[in-house]
Image (cartoon, rainbow, N blue to C red):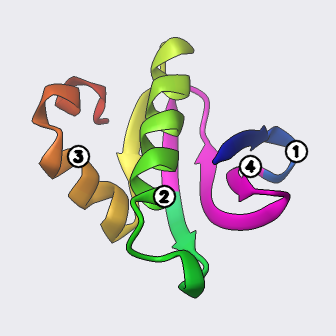
């Protein structure tokens, strides 16, 4: 899966062969990025694509020195499964 950051649309998009598989929407509030929605198209669910895009986005936000506020249940669950990343939480 290829992941692209569409900063002008405040989202990360995962594609396979050009087809949108999963999307993570966010709101950048300066020092905190609120991750507001994660969505995987139904035919692609259950393959771990949402986890991949969240991990990618978390790494990107960390590289910018910002913190994260999980606003969607999936991102909150991801952080529960990855307590080693909890220092990034706002």
Label of residue 46 in the image: none
Q: Residue at x 53, y 37 (%)?
A: 57
Tell me the SS state at disc 2: helix
Q: How many marks?
A: 4
Range of the magenta residues?
10-35
Q: Which residue is mark 2?
A: 49
Does label 1 or label 3 sit earlier along the sequence?
Answer: 1
Counting other residues with Cα less than 10 Å from the Cα at mark 3, is it few (<14), some (14-19), or many (20 or more)?
A: some
Q: Residue at x 48, y 58 (%)?
A: 49
Q: Nearer the viewer, mark 2 or mark 3?
A: 2
The residues bearing labels 3 and 4 have C-alpha atoms spaced at a distance of 20 Å
In the drawing, does residue 84 fall left or right of residue 55?
A: left
Does label 2 or label 3 sit earlier along the sequence?
Answer: 2
Label of residue 8 in the image: 1
Tell me the SS state at disc 4: loop
Rendering coords of residue 73 (x, y %): 32, 69
Q: Nearer the viewer, mark 1 or mark 2?
A: 2
Q: Does the CB distance between marks 4 and 1 fall below 8 Å? A: yes
Q: Nearer the viewer, residue 81 or 32?
A: 81
The residues bearing labels 4 and 1 have C-alpha atoms spaced at a distance of 6 Å
Rendering coords of residue 62 (x, y %): 45, 20
Label of residue 79 in the image: 3
The residues bearing labels 2 and 4 have C-alpha atoms spaced at a distance of 19 Å
Label of residue 10 in the image: 4
Tell me the SS state at disc 3: helix
Q: Nearer the viewer, residue 83 or 88?
A: 83
Q: Quadrant of residue 82?
A: top left
In the drawing, does residue 46 fall left or right of residue 2?
A: left
The residues bearing labels 2 and 3 have C-alpha atoms spaced at a distance of 16 Å
- For the stretch drawn in magenta, the main secondary structure is strand
């Amino acid at each position: 899966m290829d992941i692209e950051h569409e900063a002008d649309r405040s989202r990360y998009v995962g594609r396979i062969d050009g087809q949108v598989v999963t999307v993570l929407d966010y709101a950048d509030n300066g020092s905190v990025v609120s991750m507001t929605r994660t969505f995987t198209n139904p035919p692609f669910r259950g393959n771990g694509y949402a986890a991949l895009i969240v991990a990618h986005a978390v790494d990107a936000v960390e590289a910018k020195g910002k913190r994260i506020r999980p606003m969607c249940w999936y991102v909150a669950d991801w952080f529960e499964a990855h307590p080693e990343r909890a220092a990034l939480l706002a």
